[in-house]
Image: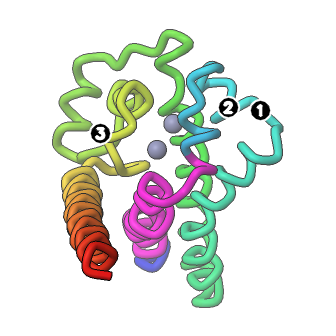
Amino acid sequence: MVMFFVALGVVIVVGDLASTFLYHVPQHIWGKLHLRTHHDRSRSYWDHAVLSRDPAIMLDGFLGALPYIVLAGALCTLGPWSAAGALTGLLLGQMHVWWRHTCEIGWKSPAWLVRFAKVTQIVLPEDHNEHHKDPDVEFGDLFRFYDAPARALLNSVRAFRRRRRTALKRLERIRALRMMRGTQRA
Ligand SMILES: [Zn+2]
Ligand SMILES: [Zn+2]
């Protein structure tokens, strides 16, 4: 019985951690698929997160869900309670995907839910709506405590790339200068 809740907790908490840092954030840094599909501003996100059957959009959804599925698969081998908990976690995760995209069709969280979400750190549709308005904020599928470390990682990778770019440019200038001097001498 305890295993039901352990497995459920692992699927949603560790699953979100893995999906955020192994798929979502890397996609925002190096990828194109997620930005082209999930952050496609030419269509409603209710449409591309919930209704669409476009293969690219479904692939993005599947890759985002993969960490949860792998975890649930492993937990399923630990006995019937664990399996039931893992599958319930997957189901809740999927329901949360639908729910967190309902802002666009008019969802408004009541005050008690906002208070509850503040304590439990659960992502409200209003929070996820911010991620669609500005792709640099509100990371974490289910829990908001992954947002701060995700942003920190994103910023440090970007800063590193900027530094590398300036260093490379400087190197190029030095090389060009040396070549010029070389040709002058010759
Ligand atoms: Zn979304
Ligand atoms: Zn995103």
Q: Quadrant of residue 174?
A: bottom left
**183 relative position to 174: left or right:** right
x%, y% of residue 166?
22, 61
Q: Which of marks 1 and 3 is in front?
A: 3
* Label 1 Cα neighbours within 10 Å, binned few <14 / some 14-19 / many ≥20: few
Vertical relation: 158 (above or below) 54: below
- Quarter of the picture holding the C terminus: bottom left
Q: What element carries label 1?
A: loop
Question: Camera-side residue: 79 or 102?
Answer: 102
Residue located beneath label 1 in the image: 52
Tell me, yes or no, whether the highlighted magenta stretch contains residue 16.
yes
Residue 48 numbered mark, or none? 2
**98 relative position to 132: left or right:** right
**Range shown magenta:** 6-34
Residue for point 58% across, 58% down: 64
Q: How is the image coloured?
A: rainbow
Residue located beneath label 3 in the image: 137
